[in-house]
Amino acid sequence: MDSLTKIDGKFKGKDIISLDQFTPLDLKILFFQTSKMKKIAYNAKPSKILNGNIVTLLFYEPSSRTFGSFSASVKQLGGQTVEIINPQQFSSVSKGETFEDTIRVFEAYCDAIILRHPQEGTAKKAAEAAFFVPIISAGDGIGEHPTQALLDLYTIYEKFKRLDNLTVLFAGDILYGRTVHSLLRGLSLFKGNTVYLLSPRQLRLTEEDRKRFSKKLKVIEIENESQIPKADVWYWTRVQKERFSNMSSYERVKNKFVLTPELIKKYAGKNTIFMHPLPRVGEIDPKVDKDPRAIYLKSQTRNGMYVRMALLGLVLGKL
Ligand code: NCD
């Protein structure tokens, strides 16, 4: 299948690899369905929307929330899952099977494959290998994490009723954070957005990405807390330890920027929302959790399941 096909209002059968495939209209369609999914999820009566569908979760990299969120999404809609974790350790992959063959074998058993993989570009590779079923990326190395950005955008939209003319602060790992890369693409679809990127110098965007995003967004790179803007959204991230080959370089940059009540008091606006894709490992002081502006363990997480339900329904042609 052609991997970077634009959605263009038609989700059915499309691979979901990058936010570059979306237009504002596609997001509108997805968000409309997402609001309906919220009601379905609250309703104790099982939905039959994905009755008869099997979705494979093929995860080559550790994941608990994205895995759980996708698995629950399929089940909320009455579908079933085949769940394969770490195939490289125990299956034919360890016998030397190629990645392409693994994809073609699993597509024979299901209607869609959700793929997480530690190498950038593998979601596209899988989409090219698959003959019949759509591939939905659940994160490819330091590349993208499209469904996380979709849920982040939905969460921001829910709060501000718009996705343009926003100021968003990203803090932490801008270089390796795939959720950041996808959300920057998502914000690029709308006019008038400004992003502040707060990170240690070593974890800034690549030059190529900085140029790319600067075409659509006002990009301001900062490295001191004193430069933090009030902003509509503060999007905090974990420094991606698993992407470092040298642990002492990781130790030097980890938790350089920590979201604390003091920082909030000094720089946040009264309507600033605090987001994080999770897991957090020290970059947010737990004291922040009870601030009503902190939504990472509240609506942001829950929206993940609703958005994935809507996306699955649309890609499988059931909505
Ligand atoms: C993120 C990821 O895997 O990229 N987690 C997630 O899917 N919610 C963020 C992270 O691991 O830091």
Image (cartoon, rainbow, N blue to C red):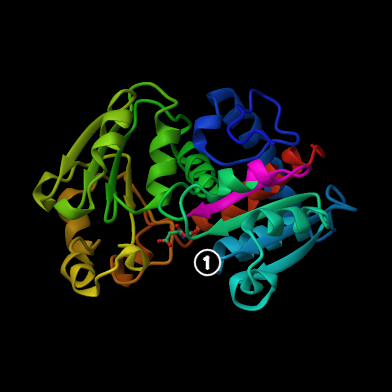
What x and y, as percent, mark residue 91? 68, 74
Most foreground residue, 193 or 46: 193
What x and y, as percent, mark residue 162? 46, 29
In the displayed structure image, the side of residue 208 where residue 225 appears, left or right: left
Q: In the image, ligand 1 is in what quadrant?
A: bottom left
Q: In the displayed structure, would residue 198 be above or below residue 214?
A: below
In the displayed structure image, the side of residue 286 where residue 186 appears, left or right: right
Most foreground residue, 157 or 316: 316
Q: Residue furthest front?
A: 96
Q: Determine which quarter of the picture holds residue 264.
A: bottom left
Most foreground residue, 220 or 97: 97
For the point 87% across and 51% down, which residue is it?
48
In the displayed structure image, the side of residue 155 where residue 56 appears, left or right: right
Task: Give the class, few, some or many, for how many residues have Cα within 10 Å of label 1's Cα (few <14, many ≥20).
Answer: some
Residue 287 in view here: yes
Quarter of the image with the N terminus is top right
Say whether mark 1 is within 8 Å of ligand 1.
Answer: yes
130 part of magenta stretch: yes
Secondary-structure class at tag 1: loop
Q: Determine which quarter of the picture holds residue 75.
A: bottom right
Q: How many marks?
A: 1
Give the residues drawn in magenta, as a range: 127-140
For the point 60% across and 26% down, which residue is it?
6
Q: Determine which quarter of the picture holds residue 69.
A: bottom right
For the point 85% across and 52% down, which residue is it?
53
What x and y, as percent, mark residue 193? 33, 28
Q: In the displayed structure, would residue 317 be above or below residue 245?
A: above
Most foreground residue, 157 or 122: 122
Q: Residue furthest right?
A: 52
For the point 22% across and 42% down, which residue is it?
230
Name the residue tied to disc 1. Answer: 61
